[in-house]
Amino acid sequence: MKQAIIVMGVSGCGKSTVGEELAEKLGIPFMEGDKLHPASNVEKMAAGTPLDDDDRWPWLDLVGAELHKGYEAGGIVISCSALKKTYRDRLRKACGGPLAFVYLEGSEALLTKRMGARTGHFMPLSLLKTQLATLEVPTGEPGVVTVSIDATPDEITENALKGLSAL
């Protein structure tokens, strides 16, 4: 059965860690969506400037193209913030088949703690507030599993798998 899954949420929620574990358990490839950002987007975020829709559309189109290729090949998990419903709808259309979202949900305090502890990432802590302000919570949309990040990565992944199996 073909599978396409986006692990989504704001910066610091664990998209990459959970996405990698989820893909490994499902036996399908994982792709880091941040690696598809053009250099100009990375430079903008690294400088503390939030992206706007004009910055995000070309990136989302690249994510959508990889999603489609991965779905057609049998399955893929991609990490992508997918903050707005219009972004998720664009990705649903690009996929070419059913698309599931695993929304990693956490409090601002927990996200701040996690972002403050990580090293080597271009996204500064200062952009967390703008991401939270931009986020349109997907709970209730079709194909969305909401998982609390107030747990270990293994527990989060297991909760995601349980939610996905119920879709």
Image (tube, rainbow, N blue to C red):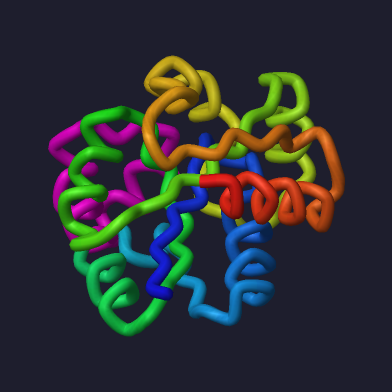
- Chief secondary structure of the magenta portion: helix
| In this picture, residue 115 sits left or right of residue 15 | right
* Span of residues in magenta: 39-64
Residue shown at 63% from the left, 64% from the top: 22
Q: For this rendering, which residue is in front, 35 or 75?
A: 75
Q: Is residue 42 magenta?
A: yes
- Relative vertical location of residue 62 with respect to residue 51 in this rendering, above or below: below
As drawn, 130 above or below 78? above
For the view shown, which residue lies furthest in the top direction?
133
Horizontal and vertical percent position of residue 125: 60, 33
Number of numbered discs on residues: 0
The residue positioned 39% from the left and 21% from the top of the image is: 136
Residue 114 vertical placement versus 156 (above, below): above
Q: 146 or 16, which is in the foreground?
A: 146
Q: Quadrant of residue 70?
A: bottom left
Q: Residue 50 magenta-drawn?
A: yes
Left or right of 102? Residue 155 is right
In this rendering, is residue 28 above or below 131?
below
**133 left or right, relative to 155:** left
Residue 27 appears in which quarter of the rendering? bottom right
Residue that appears at 20% across and 67% down: 65
Q: Position of residue 42 (x, y in %)?
A: 36, 53
Q: Is residue 63 left or right of residue 131?
A: left
Point out the image quarter for the N terminus: bottom left
Q: Quadrant of residue 19?
A: bottom right
Question: Which residue is depicted at the point 42% across and 58% down?
Answer: 34
Q: Position of residue 147 (x, y in %)?
A: 66, 37
For residue 33, say whether it is visible: yes
- Res 38 seen here: no
